[in-house]
Image (tube, rainbow, N blue to C red):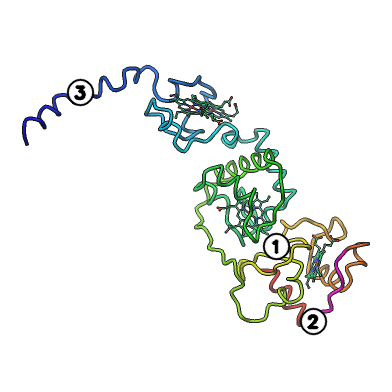
Amino acid sequence: MGLSFRLLILSLPFIVLFSSPAGAAQPGCLGCHKRHYVERGRCVTCHRGDDRTDRKRVAHDGLIPGRFAWFTIQGSPPVERGKKLMDTFACRRCHTIGGKGNRPAANLDSSALLRQPREIFHAIQSPVQYMPDFRPADGEITDMVNAILAGATAKKSKETPLVVHFQNTGTRENIFEKHCGACHRMLSTRDGGIGKGEIGPNLSGLFSPFYPATFRERERWSAANLKKWVANPRRIKNGTLMQPIPLNEQEFAGLTEILQH
Ligand code: HEC
Ligand code: HEC
Ligand code: HEC
Ligand code: HEC
């Protein structure tokens, strides 16, 4: 412990004083930006970032840009538009969003809070193998990101993230893979991603309330309805591209069992 150490101690108050001359009057963000939404919280409540510095690069670390900050305002137009889009695309076939939905893929209520908005954006723009590519416009993706984050913030789900297996794990014969997988895919909580086809719709959660009611254009897909469809799709929908698939009782039972998981 020499002289230099004591000198450092003595000079500490000066370092603190002179390093942020405007510190107390115009801290962090307000040195460069005007206030808005003051009644709803501090800048970092909605934008994250770091408001203990005047340096932009540091202050903007992990910043949520304006276009993604709408999620903090429940009921705002981007959030409402995003919710509608996710209903249209039936994202809840595979995800839990805002407390509702199936669970073969990530519960977005818990996983979204661990991600940067642009990572969520990217996950929708360039989807993984077993997530359909909806090809939404950038503005639509931005709206969905806001709606996902709004749902996640409202729910703050305590569930642990589910680990998804993307390969068919079972070696036992999979009826879905064999008879449907050339044209369809599905994601199952138990079996992971099965099927390789692109020309038919993704059948994840077919019997759940989150799959669109497309049987006879407005009915739900029950096992009984699926049986009629598979036996003769053209009797249900004129001009459909899907051919009849002959299945015996046992095969059909195996198929519905897979579709239920
Ligand atoms: C040293 C000045 C400076 C500080 C400090 C600063 N910013 Fe900025 N900020 C800017 C400038 C300049 C822009 C314009 C766009 C750019 O250059 O990134 C900007 C842009 C933004 C944007 C818009 C980004 C977008 O793409 O929509 C947000 C939001 C923002 N700042 C929030 C904050 C918050 C919150 C803080 C405090 C935690 C903060 N800023 C601190 C200078 C600053
Ligand atoms: C309640 C949440 C909320 C709070 C608190 C908030 N913002 Fe924002 N901010 C938003 C939203 C939503 C937008 C995008 C829409 C808009 O411009 O109103 C935005 C946009 C911005 C932009 C980009 C504006 C533009 O024209 O592109 C900047 C910069 C910004 N905020 C800075 C700040 C700063 C600095 C603070 C703290 C004084 C702050 N915000 C507090 C929600 C908030
Ligand atoms: C057929 C099933 C399926 C559908 C439908 C689906 N996804 Fe996904 N999604 C996945 C899979 C699989 C992943 C990979 C990560 C995981 O869930 O384990 C994923 C990942 C994501 C992620 C990244 C999650 C994270 O934490 O990494 C987001 C965000 C997302 N999906 C949003 C959407 C949105 C929005 C829709 C509707 C427009 C949608 N998904 C529809 C299967 C699906
Ligand atoms: C040779 C390709 C092919 C095979 C094999 C096939 N499908 Fe399809 N399936 C399609 C196509 C294409 C469509 C879209 C038809 C349309 O929309 O008119 C479709 C549509 C469907 C639909 C309607 C979904 C909706 O939302 O409208 C269901 C349900 C379905 N198939 C179930 C099955 C099942 C179960 C099997 C296996 C037993 C199977 N399909 C095998 C090509 C196939």
Looking at the image, tell me whether mark 2 or mark 3 is earlier in sequence order. 3
Q: CA distance from mark 1 to mark 2?
A: 21 Å
Q: CA distance from mark 3 to mark 1?
A: 64 Å
Q: Which mark is residue 107?
A: none
Q: CA distance from mark 2 to mark 3?
A: 84 Å
Q: Is residue 242 magenta?
A: yes
Q: Residue at x 76, y 71 (%)?
A: 180
Residue to which mark 2 is pinned: 249
Q: Comparing marks 3 and 1, which lies closer to the viewer?
A: 3
Magenta-highlighted residues: 241-249
Q: Does label 3 point to a residue whose CB lies under 8 Å from ligand 1? A: no
Residue 53, picture quadrant: top left
Note whether 31 is above or below 46 in the view shown.
above
Q: Is residue 217 magenta?
A: no
Looking at the image, tell me whether mark 3 or mark 1 is earlier in sequence order. 3
- Which image quarter holds the N terminus? top left
Q: Residue 108 placed where, x, y %?
A: 58, 51
Q: Secondary structure at mark 3?
A: helix
Q: Residue 147 placed where, x, y %?
A: 63, 42
Note whether 31 is above or below 157 in the view shown.
above
Main SS of the magenta segment?
loop
Residues packed near mark 3 inside 10 Å, few (<14), some (14 to 19) or many (20 plus): few
Residues packed near mark 2 inside 10 Å, few (<14), some (14 to 19) or many (20 plus): few
Residue to which mark 1 is pinned: 205
Q: Amino acid at mark 3?
A: Pro
Q: Residue at x 16, y 24 (%)?
A: 11
